Image: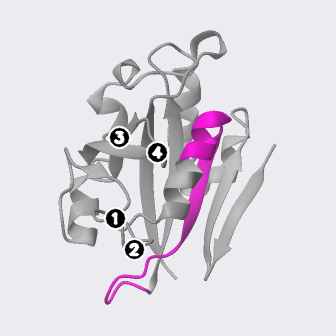
Amino acid sequence: MNVNLVEDEGWFLEAKHLNTDTDTFGDLKSLGDLWHARRIGGALPTWKDFELQDFQNWYGWLCVFDIVEGDPLALKVRLWGTHITGMMGEDITGTMVAPTATSSQFEHGGYTLKEIEFYDHLRNGPFIGYSGGRLKLENRDHIRYTELHLPLARDGKTVDQFLTITSRKPL
């Protein structure tokens, strides 16, 4: 089941079935394949199922989020890639991504309430997330970003983390 939740000014958020053909993930295919290879008996992998060298071509483009229960859901940033830090202008490793009281924007990382609701939807599916579009950052709107959001579960079924990989290309 593929669900397109949001299409806002060229940015898309799609929830994909766990068994979606990884060819649909373009240049993120290899990471989808890696994630599937770690699904023993159909169980969701955990972050500990991966080795750092698994990501040698993607160093700096990885994020790992721990899910923090609440309404709305919040995410604790376990890992925020160095290339993403350079792109966004701040390293938010170790911080909470949670809504501010006065804005639809999140305090760190530029996450909106829609995006956190998207993570919540992916968690409850569970689904693989696929998102992308132009990132609205000064002098960077000529680059198209795609992200693959892979659910992780310490018990193999209850999503408690996400591994997110970002790719970018000039438009």
Please give the range of residues in magenta: 120-141
**Which amino acid, mark 1?**
Thr
Q: CA distance from mark 3 to mark 4?
A: 15 Å
- Residue 13 visible? The answer is yes
Q: Earlier in the sequence, mark 3 or mark 2?
A: 3
Residue bearing the label numbered 2: 103
x and y, in percent, of residue 54 in the image = 36, 31
Question: Does 47 appear in magenta?
Answer: no
Q: How far is the residue under mark 2 from the one under mark 1?
A: 6 Å
Looking at the image, tell me whether mark 4 or mark 1 is earlier in sequence order: 4
- Report the residue marked by disc 3: 64
* Marks 2 and 1 close (CB-CB < 8 Å): yes
Task: Give the residue at mark 4.
Answer: 73
Task: Give x and y (percent) for residue 87.
Answer: 27, 70
Comes first in the chain, label 3 or label 4: 3
Residue 122: x percent and y percent?
61, 42
Residue behind mark 1: 100
Seen in the image, is 13 located left or right of residue 141?
Answer: right
The residue carrying pointer 2 sits among few (fewer than 14), some (14 to 19) or many (20 or more) residues within 10 Å by Cα, namely: few
Going by the numbered disc 2, the residue's amino acid type is Ser
Residue located at (64% from left, 9% from top): 41
